[in-house]
Image (tube, rainbow, N blue to C red):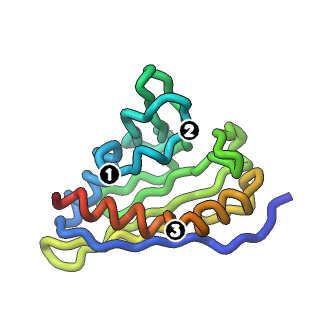
Amino acid sequence: MTMTLADLHGTATVRLPLSRAFDFFTGSMSRWWPSEYHLGEADMVDTVLEPAVGGRWFERDADGNECDWGRVLVWEPPTRLVVTWQINGHWQYDDNPEHASEIEVRFEADGPEQTTVHLEHRHLGRLVAAEALRDGIVQSGGGWSTILERFARIAVG
């Protein structure tokens, strides 16, 4: 049984054209994803989002181990991406797709050299120990807006 939890949202504006913003977000995730946000026991060295429907979203650590985070559900460059988030409230990967939440990321051109990125993390109630995950994200002050702001800073840095 799933519980109802409010969706999480984040927004940031990046000084990149639409296509470049999408490409940097999806193809250079290890450059902007906070390295402290990982599942493996060793330090994370890479964050990979395979660019196709059904592709994996995962981390690779310093020992060469891989930890899945989810799968690509929608791949519509340069405007939209939807992935599953299969990390439960115990910060462990859950391979049961019925327990997956979803993250939708939309890219909207604000002119030729600027893009706004909108993120919605929905269906949180499907996750095992969902409240612990949500509360940890919200209370830590991290959250999606902070991660997206980091993306925007690094993308143009």
Estimate the x, y position of residue 3 in percent, counting from the top left. 80, 65
Q: Residue furthest left?
A: 112
Estimate the x, y position of residue 51 in percent, counting from the top left. 37, 42
Front residue of 135 and 76? 135
Q: Secondary structure at mark 2?
A: loop
**Residue 16 image-quadrant placement:** bottom left
User: Which quarter of the image is occupied by the N terminus?
Assistant: bottom right
Q: Residues within 10 Å of mark 1 (few under 14, many from 20)?
A: some
- The residues bearing labels 3 and 2 have C-alpha atoms spaced at a distance of 19 Å
The residue sitting at 66% across, 50% down in the picture is 100
Q: Which mark is residue 154?
A: none
Estimate the x, y position of residue 108 in percent, counting from the top left. 31, 73
What is the three-letter code of the residue carrying label 1? Answer: Trp
Q: Which residue is mark 2?
A: 39
Front residue of 38 and 26? 38
What is the three-letter code of the residue carrying label 3? Answer: Gly
- The residues bearing labels 1 and 2 have C-alpha atoms spaced at a distance of 17 Å
Q: Which residue is mark 3?
A: 141
- Front tag of 1 and 3: 3
Q: Which residue is mark 1?
A: 32
